[in-house]
Image (spheres, rainbow, N blue to C red):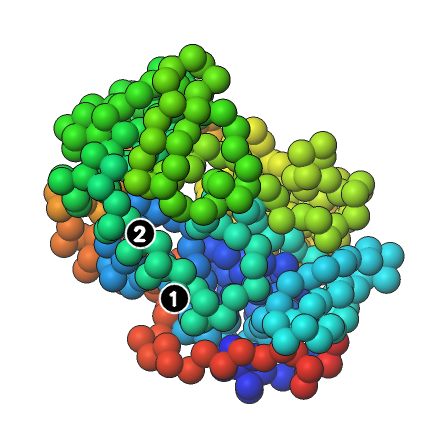
Amino acid sequence: MLGFQGVKKRSKLPTVLIIGMGDTGVLVAAHLRRNCQVVAVTTRPVLLSGQELGKRLTDLAYWKKSYLTPLDAFRKLDDVECIHGKVIAVNTEEQVASVECNDKSTRSVCWDYLVIASGISNGFWRTARVESVEDVEFDLERQTSTIMSAKRVAVIGGGPSGTSVAFNVASRFPDKDVTLFFSGEEVLPGYHPKTRAYHMNRLGEAGVIVKPGHRAVNSTDEVRTALKGGTVAFSSGQPDYSGDLLIWATGAVHPNTAFLPPDMLDEAGFIKTDTTMTVVGYSNVFAIGDAAATDPLRSSARNWAYRIVCRNINALIQGKFPAHRFQPPGSRWGSVLGLQSNGLTLHQQNGRRHRLPVWFVQLILWPWIVTRGIYGGIRKDTSRHQVSNGLNNDG
């Protein structure tokens, strides 16, 4: 079970089932494992972060050090039972989930509390596929090789992913022709106007050909996830564009929620939650991350929302009302471009920004604040990842 063969059932503790072990799922599991028996279902035996897409495509060796981590390397997951597979159905009356394991066998998992952190599918970099370590590594190498071989690159979409990709590709490979198409007048909708203006300038400085007011004709999922050359058409009237490589980052997301009862979902398939992160109509079911309809930006994937979920589950266990509430920010914040040669630029909600020097990021921010402070420590020896289909464990 991801190397955690020593995990034992603690029968007196309530069982929390976490569906999805992305960034938020890992944090919830790590902070609940003391008071609960935590079982998690993960489509991959590694944390494959959806963050820093631009760095992932242009500096894979650096990106992997921070954003690709075997789950059994997290010290705070030692008491967590992880099942490699995907949930195919949830029965809320019997409080049991049906899991299709990575070897195609099935297993039933009972729970007292359920946390849904199943995330979204978005382009080629966020998928719901069940994958092995080898699958993940192969895809990462293939994607970076595709970037390397392309001369004429088009990025479609002006959100943080599209902006990050266009900037990093142009900065890292100045010989490439990089064009960024987006429908608005500026990139980064949802960010403060000062942040948006700043990145418009940075894109120009990096040599990106910026094309505002270009609304691409919506394409199929197959085209958006293909990461290959082709032609993009625009419903806003501009001529078609053909390139060696089209990178779609238009925000056409699909929540990974098909396994849930329909009454949990809104019209777009996202999970209806209240301010306590509880799923509407279900007192012992919580949702967090990109699949949770907490606010228009679905910002519980960030903003310390995992603390709200953990505190409210612990309150229920103690017989108290889940009183902690999530307050989403008015605008998005944080890093957009990732670590650059001049440091890491962080943007605040009010549009102000400050830059952390490279030495601070590498020697203090990541190893001490993030790795130890937030995640509770990560082992350097990550050669132990052995995946279990869960058949040798009680459901």
Decide which of 135, 63 is in the foreground and name it.
Answer: 135
Circle 1: element type: helix
Query: In the image shown, does 249 or 28 lie closer to the viewer?
Result: 249
Task: Name the residue at 19% across, 25% down.
Answer: 204
Looking at the image, residue 213 lies above or below residue 389: above
Mark 1: amino acid: Glu
Could you say where residue 234 lies in the image, as x and y percent from the top left? 44, 20
Q: Which residue is mark 2?
A: 146
5 left or right of 358?
right
Q: Is residue 124 left or right of residue 281?
A: left
Q: Quadrant of the N terminus?
A: bottom right
On the image, the x and y values in percent for residue 25 come to 54, 57
What kind of element bears circle 2? Answer: helix
Would residue 350 be visible to someone looking at this image? no
The residue pinned by badge 1 equals 137
Residue 211 lies left or right of residue 259; in this view the side is left
Q: CA distance from mark 2 to mark 1?
A: 14 Å
Seen at 44% across and 14% down, the residue is: 236
Task: Give amino acid for label 2.
Answer: Thr
The number of callouts visible is: 2
